Amino acid sequence: QKEVEQDPGPLSVPEGAIVSLNCTYSNSAFQYFMWYRQYSRKGPELLMYTYSSGNKEDGRFTAQVDKSSKYISLFIRDSQPSDSATYLCAMSGYRVGDRLAFGKGNQVVVIP
Amino acid sequence: GAGVSQSPSNKVTEKGKDVELRCDPISGHTALYWYRQRLGQGLEFLIYFQGNSAPDKSGLPSDRFSAERTGESVSTLTIQRTQQEDSAVYLCASWGTETYEQYFGPGTRLTVT
């Protein structure tokens, strides 16, 4: 079983829709949970991070972590064409700076 | 200041040749990571440098892969006797202590023919 599972299926949504992405993981030592956004031919950039369980909101983006279920989610409200990118979940242990374990990523296309 | 830079941006090489990839981290960042991203896959950890500590090489897939870093400066990733399965984007990231974020470079797209 891979440490981080993210169904890599592409996702196409109309502009203004809610995008819902999720990952599951197996390593209970993970404490930091992140979502990265990667545009084509660019390096990933950090979108949001959460420490331990709970919700975090930043503008149109909401990240949720449920450690009891080993499940994390990212929601994008009022999606825009500029949100079209690949979204990767990532997580690491308790030591800040630990290597990240990544999911495979979801390619999201927001159709105007 | 400037972000993480990597060179070359693209590299095409013949099977069996050696290649060297370069990463310039953000100035002052003590930690540097190399990851590999194959088509349709997530990022695979390769190696981690933290200051003057011994690097964490646990992700290197074979002894054909090696990396060096002098102090807190440039790092080079070397792949010897390249194979077609080495074709991927190689990403470098650096991390400082001011935030939790690992900052990624744009990557080097390696194609082995």
Image: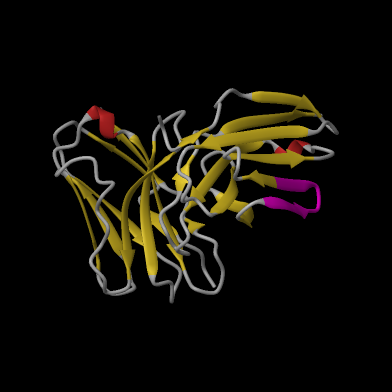
Q: Quadrant of residue A38?
A: top right
Residue B42, position in %: x, y? 46, 36
Observer-nearest of B41 and B74: B41
Give, as a single range, the part of the protein colored magenta.
A54-63
Tell whether A16 sits left or right of B79.
right
Residue A47, position in %: x, y? 64, 52
Is the residue B9 above or below the residue B37 in the image? below
Q: Residue at x 28, y 46 (%)?
A: B59
Q: Residue at x 54, y 64 (%)?
A: B100
Residue B58, position in %: x, y? 26, 50
Tell whether B28 sits left or right of B17.
right
Q: Residue at x 15, y 38 (%)?
A: B17
Observer-nearest of A20 and A51: A51
Residue A33, position in %: x, y? 57, 50
Magenta: main secondary structure: strand
Tell whether B82 sits left or right of A50.
left
Q: Quadrant of residue B56?
A: bottom left
For the C terminus of chain B, the image quarter is: top left
Say if the magenta span includes residue A94. Answer: no
Q: Residue at x 25, y 46 (%)?
A: B60
Say if the magenta span includes residue A56. Answer: yes
For the N terminus of chain B, the image quarter is: bottom right
Is the residue B94 above or below the residue B107 in the image? below
Tell whether B89 sits left or right of A77.
left
Q: How many marks?
A: 0
Is the residue B64 above or below the residue B76 in the image? above
Would you say residue A43 is visible in this rendering? no
